[in-house]
Amino acid sequence: MSETVLLIGGGGREHAIARALEESDADLYACAGNRNPGIARIAEGFETLETTNPEAVVEYAADVDAGIAVIGPESPLEAGVADALEEAGVYAFGPKEADARIETDKAFQRRFMRENDVPGCPDFETFDDMEAACDYIDEYDGDLAIKPAGLTGGKGVKVIGDQVTAEEGKAYIRESDYDRIVLEERLIGEEFTIQAFVANDTLETAPAVQDHKRAYEGDEGPNTGGMGSYSDATTHLPFMTENDYEEAVSIMEATVDALEDYRGILYGQFMLTAAGPKVVEFNARFGDPEAMNTLPVLETDFLDVLTAARDGDPVPELEFAGRATVCKYAVPAGYPTDPEAGAKVQVDEESVARAVRATQDSSGDEPRESAGDALLYYASVDEREDGIYTTTSRAFAVVGVADSITDAETIAEDALEVAGDEGLHVRHDIGKPDLVQRRIDHVNDLRGE
Ligand code: AMP
Ligand code: GLY
């Protein structure tokens, strides 16, 4: 029997989810605040609505007779969309509002780790008195990360000693009107993401991914929602050991144990420090861009995961293709501080589909088809009658899939070239050999190797 699935959200991550369900026996419907042309094309129906309005989502779910819903972004989780769907008899793959606090309330998240003895928690304090927070900065021996407790799309964190000085950090706290902030030990190392599929007290993890938060090449500029990301053909990344990956997975297992009845994706953001992996944060959903690295190499039918979760079964053992991926976002000029919304985006999808690169074989003369794929994902663009327009967020992404990160990166670049990224900004350094080598050198330095 086919299943009717409602997908909530209209970004690149949700386009990747739609693709993962496209091949399966799902009747897919989708709703989002923007009309994402990639999702709209795959889905049998697409409704533009406010996804943080639980009644609107439930009404559409009833209209299409959905049995399962997949919630992509964090804002509907925070608004209680999963709770409302459950009440209406729709199985929501995404945590209830109270469980989503693991992401939506960073103060709760840190206290939760401390109270449940989850390993990998940095030293932290929470504050609702901003002057007391400034005093703590003056007294603390070392650098601190300043984190607003609520959602800021990854853009509210300021790290002393990295992005700001202590004085600038205090000025930031005083100028902002946050009710509550977390001050925590600055972690030094390399970041990576592990996404776990969780249901019925079981979890299965995907290969690690490294996102790039800073807006400009060389990790300069303001933090963004993520400019691009890569994963390797192995579960771990070139700067990690398999043991680092396993250690991070065990932190996620301890978290899921302590959460009880959590369901959906649990996203662990880790810093690989000299003392091993530490938790930067948890999210209650797939990462964006990380979903675009993970779902194209997921060989298990995503619908099987959803139905097992709904039926009270363990999450099926996940199979991954064992291939590397490199994802690069094209974002509006000025993103994230002053993004140019309303610009027309022209994407040549046909050419991207053909952008499978011909590489030279080892003898250097006979060209051969590289075993690679180029994928295109639409993100926060809006399709109108006369074309596709940017919003204030990321426009589209390309993903190269190949046997090595280097080949995947070349494919992603070729895809970008033919897709046409005029007027948009891209971090071309993501996945290039010298940036990956810098990550390896960084960790080797920290470990004194
Ligand atoms: P978050 O919204 O918690 O993911 O933070 C955004 C970014 O800020 C992270 O991806 C890190 O680059 C940085 N960050 C957050 N917490 C820390 C920390 N304790 N030490 C160093 N950097 C951090
Ligand atoms: N790529 C970071 C996030 O999805 O939060």
Image: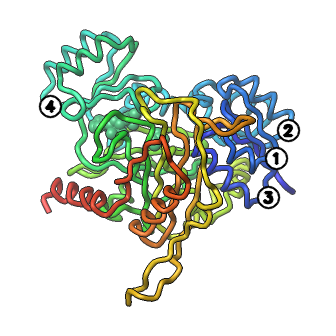
Q: Residue at x 56, y 54 (%)?
A: 419
* Numbered circle sitting on residue 232: none
Amino acid beneath label 2: Val
Judged from the image, the secondary structure of the residue bearing numbered disc 2 is helix
Task: State the residue in front, 169 or 308.
Answer: 169
Q: Quadrant of the C terminus?
A: bottom left
Picture coordinates of residue 246, whole percent (x, y): 38, 59
Asked if marks 1 and 3 touch (Cβ < 8 Å), the reply is no
Earlier along the polypeptide chain: callout 3 or callout 2? 3
Q: Visible in this render: residue 411?
A: yes
Does residue 7 appear to the left or right of 273 in the view shown?
Answer: right
As measured in the structure, the alpha-carbon distance from the residue carrying label 1 to the one carrying label 2 is 10 Å
| Above or below 220: residue 418 | below
Q: Identify the residue position indicated by label 1 in the image.
A: 44
Label 4 and label 2: CA atoms lie apart by: 55 Å
* Residue at image coords 26%, 62%: 437
| Residue type marked 3 | Asp
Which label belongs to residue 25? 3
Which image quarter: residue 50? top right
* Callout 1 touching callout 2 (CB < 8 Å): yes
Secondary element at tag 3:
loop
The residue lying toward the viewer, choosing from 157 and 259, is 157
Helix, strand, or loop for circle 1?
loop
Mark carried by residue 64: 2
Q: Which residue is mark 4?
A: 142
Q: Residues within 10 Å of mark 1 (few under 14, many from 20)?
A: few
Q: CA distance from mark 3 to mark 4?
A: 54 Å
